[in-house]
Image (cartoon, grey):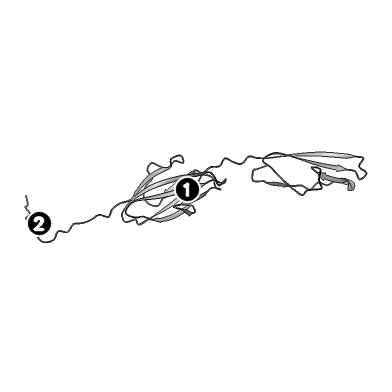
C-alpha cells in the first residue's frame, strides 16, 4: 500500500459461530501499519477448540518519498533572474526599474507537501516593498519531514531614479555654438 496508508481495516468472519482472533487478540477492526512488511494472522477456531484455521495476510507499506526542500520555480512579476532558475542554484540576482516600488515573488516547491516562506511570510507568493538599491528576498522551503530545509536568495537591485539637472541663471558662463 502507499506510504500515506497508516492503517488497514479488517472485517474477518468465521463461519458457524467459531471463535476468532487477530494476531492472537480479540478482533481488531483497524490495524496500524508500520513502514515495510506487516504480517497479520487471523485465526478461526471451533467453539469446542478442536479445529483451527490460520490465515496470514501480508501488507507492505511503502517507504516515504525522500524529503525534498527544493523549488520547482521562482518567478518575479518584474525583472529577470540571473542566472536562469535551476533547483540546484540557491543564489540569484535581478534588477528592477526605479518606478517599481514593489515586487511580487512566487515560489513553487518541487514536492506539493513542502511549505514555503518568502521573507518570513508563509505562502507561495508575497509582494515585497523594494527600496532604492539592493533588497534581499529570501525563500525558505521546508520539506514534509519538517527538518529538511533549503534557502534561496534573490538580491534584487532597484535602480536609482533618473535625476535631471536644471541649471539656474548664472550657472552657465557662456555657450558657444559651432
Where does the image place residue 160, in percent across and percent down from the top left?
28, 53
Decide: few, some or many residues near mark 2? Use Cα within 10 Å; few <14, some 14-19, many ≥20.
Answer: few
Q: Is residue 154 left or right of residue 164?
A: right
The quarter of the rendered structure image containing the N terminus is top right
Residue hosting label 2:
172
Using the image, determine if residue 125 lies above or below residue 35. below
Where does the image place residue 7, in percent across and percent down from the top left?
70, 47
Residue at the image point whose x is 76% and y is 47% from the top? 10
Residue at the image point whose x is 13% and y is 61% from the top? 168
Residue at the image point whose x is 25% and y is 54% from the top? 162
Quadrant in the rendering for residue 46: top right
Using the image, determine if residue 32 lies above or below residue 164. above
Quadrant in the rendering for residue 67: top right
Using the image, determine if residue 62 lies above or below residue 172. above
Q: Is residue 67 left or right of residue 5?
A: left
Residue hosting label 1:
140
| Residue at far front of view | 147
| Residue at far bottom of view | 169
Where does the image place residue 65, in percent across and percent down from the top left?
59, 41
Compute the Cα span from label 2 to label 1. Answer: 55 Å
**Is 19 in front, or is 178?**
19
Where does the image place residue 12, in percent across and percent down from the top left?
81, 46
Decide: few, some or many residues near mark 1? Use Cα within 10 Å; few <14, some 14-19, many ≥20.
Answer: many
Amino acid at each position: 500500500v502507499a506510504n500515506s496508508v497508516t492503517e488497514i481495516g479488517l472485517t474477518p468472519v468465521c463461519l458457524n459461530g467459531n471463535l476468532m482472533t487477530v494476531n492472537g487478540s480479540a478482533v481488531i477492526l483497524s490495524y496500524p501499519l508500520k513502514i515495510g512488511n506487516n504480517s497479520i494472522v487471523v485465526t478461526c477456531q471451533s467453539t469446542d477448540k478442536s479445529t483451527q484455521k490460520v490465515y496470514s495476510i501480508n501488507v507492505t507499506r511503502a517507504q516515504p518519498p525522500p524529503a525534498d526542500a527544493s523549488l520547482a520555480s521562482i518567478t518575479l512579476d518584474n525583472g529577470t533572474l540571473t542566472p536562469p532558475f535551476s533547483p540546484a542554484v540557491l543564489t540569484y540576482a535581478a534588477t528592477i526599474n526605479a518606478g517599481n516600488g514593489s515586487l511580487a515573488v512566487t515560489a513553487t516547491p518541487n514536492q506539493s507537501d513542502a511549505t514555503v516562506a518568502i521573507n518570513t511570510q508563509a505562502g507561495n507568493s508575497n509582494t515585497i516593498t523594494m527600496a532604492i538599491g539592493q533588497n534581499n528576498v529570501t525563500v525558505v522551503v521546508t520539506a514534509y519531514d519538517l527538518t529538511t530545509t533549503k534557502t534561496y536568495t534573490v538580491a534584487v537591485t532597484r535602480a536609482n531614479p533618473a535625476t535631471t539637472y536644471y541649471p539656474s541663471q548664472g550657472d552657465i558662463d557662456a555657450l558657444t555654438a559651432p
